[in-house]
Image (cartoon, rainbow, N blue to C red):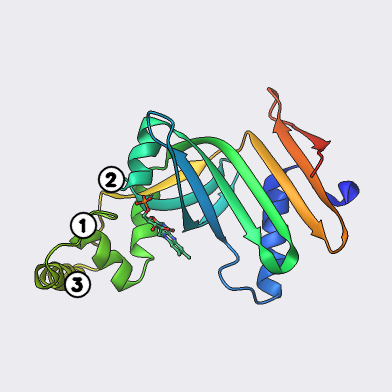
């Protein structure tokens, strides 16, 4: 397997997502993101990978959410992809920085009406409270978006994780799983090491 691994782990991520898409897997670009608060307590949840470029792995969320606040306190995260049908796991770790406002706004505008209205109506992860008051806020947000389709939320934030480390695990039926680690060197290049699975 080692010979088939690309020099950069992001190239492997793109290859494995492509293979998952070809196989018709649902949400092949979903990942678990783990963050930690200022005391080091971790928290994790699912999100969608938005893009991969020279800077790293892009995702978007609400800056005032638990993960958003944790990323502003401790700007480091791990993103774990798992493609169960292929027995594959790929994990990335590295610093996370917020993207430009224009990238965040573009991402927000590309989202569906329910997702945009939800962000405008109430803070992600905070108590929803009284049902009719919540519905009224959603209705107001939907109307605002219908009147001004370009409307965005300053709370919607694109982020990029620049990988410093990545590891790969490939299950092999009854055979021993294969496991490799990529470590980024000071020159920006990657060193690949086989690990015990
Ligand atoms: C398949 C799937 C995709 C999701 N994608 C996103 C996403 O791209 N961004 C996001 O903020 N939350 C996304 N969520 C919701 C998060 O998992 C989470 O519930 C939410 O962001 C609040 O997390 P927090 O309170 O820990 O910050 C997704 C959930 C699922 C199940």
* Left or right of 154 in this view: 191: right
* Of the image marks 3 and 1, the number of the one nearer the N terminus: 1
Q: Give the vertical position of 164 relative to 22 (above or below).
A: above
Q: Give the vertical position of 125 relative to 186 (above or below).
A: below
Residue that carries the numbered disc 2 in the rendered image: 64
SS for dot 3: helix
Residue that carries the numbered disc 3 in the rendered image: 142
For the residue carrying disc 1, how many other residues have a C-alpha within 10 Å: few (<14), some (14-19), or many (20+)?
A: few
Residue 7 appearing in the image: no
Counting from the top left corner in percent of width and height, residue 136 is at: 10, 71
x 63%, y 33%: residue: 164
Look at discs 2 and 3 and give the one toward the viewer. 2
Residue that carries the numbered disc 1 in the rendered image: 127
SS for dot 2: loop
* Left or right of 113 in this view: 180: right
| Quadrant the C terminus occupies | top right
């Amino acid at each position: 397997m080692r010979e088939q691994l690309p020099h950069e782990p992001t190239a492997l991520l793109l290859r494995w997502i492509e293979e998952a898409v070809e196989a018709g897997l649902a949400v092949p670009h979903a990942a678990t993101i783990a963050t930690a608060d200022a005391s080091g307590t971790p928290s994790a949840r699912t999100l969608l990978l938005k893009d991969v470029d020279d800077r790293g792995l892009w995702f978007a969320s609400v800056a005032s959410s638990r993960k958003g606040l944790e990323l502003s306190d401790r700007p480091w995260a791990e993103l774990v992809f798992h493609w169960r049908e292929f027995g594959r796991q790929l994990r990335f770790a590295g610093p996370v920085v917020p993207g430009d406002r224009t990238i965040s706004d573009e991402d927000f505008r590309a989202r569906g009406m329910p997702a945009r209205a939800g962000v405008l109506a109430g803070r992600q992860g905070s108590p929803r409270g009284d049902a009719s008051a919540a519905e009224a806020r959603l209705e107001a947000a939907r109307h605002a978006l219908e009147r001004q389709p370009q409307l965005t939320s300053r709370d919607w934030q694109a982020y990029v994780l620049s990988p410093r480390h990545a590891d790969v695990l490939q299950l092999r039926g009854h055979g021993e799983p294969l496991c490799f680690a990529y470590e980024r060197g000071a020159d920006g290049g990657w060193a690949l090491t086989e690990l015990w699975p």
